[in-house]
Amino acid sequence: MWRTINVVFKLKTPLHIGYLPSKSSVVSPTRYYIPGRNLWGAVTKRTAENLFKKPAAHHYKNTGKDIMNNFVFSYFYIYDGKTIYSPSYTDEGIKYGHDIKITRAEFEHRFIGSQISTAIEPGSSTAKDQSLHEIEFINNKSCDKTGTPEDVKVTGWIWIKEDAKINNREVDVDAGIFIDNFNIIQELILGGESKYGFGHVLLDGVNKIAPPFEVKVQDSVTVSSEFLISHLKYDKNLNFRGDLELLAGRGYFDPETQRGGSGPGATISKPQYYFTPGTKLEDKTYFRMTWDGKLRLSA
């Protein structure tokens, strides 16, 4: 059996969740949500660095395996205190919001920003050729309908096995997720561009929100939703309304094959096509969620 915790993070700094560029005007676009794999990576790093004084590559790898075998991370979406801004492909195009839906333009105006930087030629103090770099990000501040500034938050769900142990230490779930009285989700660094200060999130609360989808928790975590709440591997036999994406990842090791382990970013997982979050499948609404939040068709 599993224990369930709803988690809300507040963005202390802007958040960049990178993927392959899709817009010519943006060199480094961001996802508008946080995949479960990003949560797993950040929690693995924080946990290993708390458990070991000088963690080596094998410490990160073994900690990551333990967490992968005992945790399930949903995708996390922007949350304004009322609405969870998950995507859905409607007859009018893609919309954001699980209840009150807004257009992509409205969503980007409220939550998405970018910054441009360039390298400078030391001799002429002019921009270096081909060095212009634009980074898109989820803002850590937005304005409500009255124009009042407010913190941007993200929310999602984490499931932990009842008998979970990380490095032979028990896992307690209360106002956070604790190992040796250390809250491994109190603050995290998520996504890319952390050298510029991006990706710092702070725990804002737990168990405040009921999921906007049906959940059944037994031997596995099964969810039911009209629109996909995370990626699902492409199947040519499925009729759908939505989009496809080629997914790959990199890290210390490939969690699926266990290859690698020599250093951060050393291993790239095999690219595969997936239905994107928000896609609607005909007659398929029940899915089993894997450790990184991806979905598989439920039998």
Image: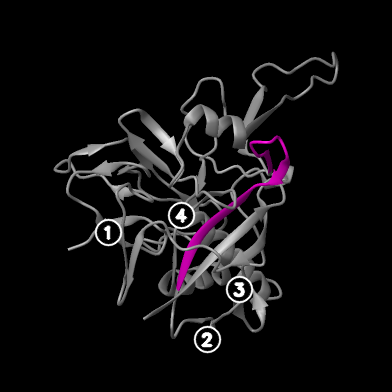
Residue under the point 67% across and 22% down: 132
Three-letter amino acid code of the residue under disc 2: Asn
Q: State the residue in front, 200 or 58.
A: 200
Q: Is residue 183 left or right of residue 170?
A: right
Colour style of the rendered protein structure: one colour
Instruction: Measure the C-alpha gap from mark 3 to mark 4.
Output: 18 Å
Residue 75 numbered tag: 4
Decide: few, some or many residues near mark 4? Use Cα within 10 Å; few <14, some 14-19, many ≥20. many
Please say if the residues under marks 2 and 3 sit with CB atoms less than 8 Å apart: no
Local secondary structure at mark 2: loop
Q: Residue at x 56, y 64 (%)?
A: 7
- Amino acid type at circle 3 is Gly
Sequence-wise, the earlier of marks 1 and 3 is: 3
Helix, strand or loop for disc 1: strand
What segment carries the magenta color?
Answer: 141-159
Q: Are dots 1 and 2 in contact, CB under 8 Å?
A: no
How far apart are the alpha carbons under marks 1 and 4? 14 Å
Task: Indicate the position of residue 128 as horizontal and vertical percent values.
Answer: 73, 18
Count residues near mark 2 (Cα–Cα under 10 Å), then give few for <14, some for 14-19, many for 20+.
few
Labelled pair 1, 3 in contact (Cβ < 8 Å): no
Q: Main secondary structure of the magenta part?
A: strand
The numbered mark at residue 212 is none
Which quarter of the rendered picture does the C terminus lie within? bottom left
Q: Which quarter of the picture shows residue 281?
A: top left
Can you tell which mark lies on residue 176? 3
Q: Position of residue 84 (x, y in %)?
A: 50, 49
Q: Which amino acid does the dot numbered 4 rest on?
A: Tyr
In the rendered image, which residue does mark 1 sit on?
287
Residue 275, can we see it?
yes
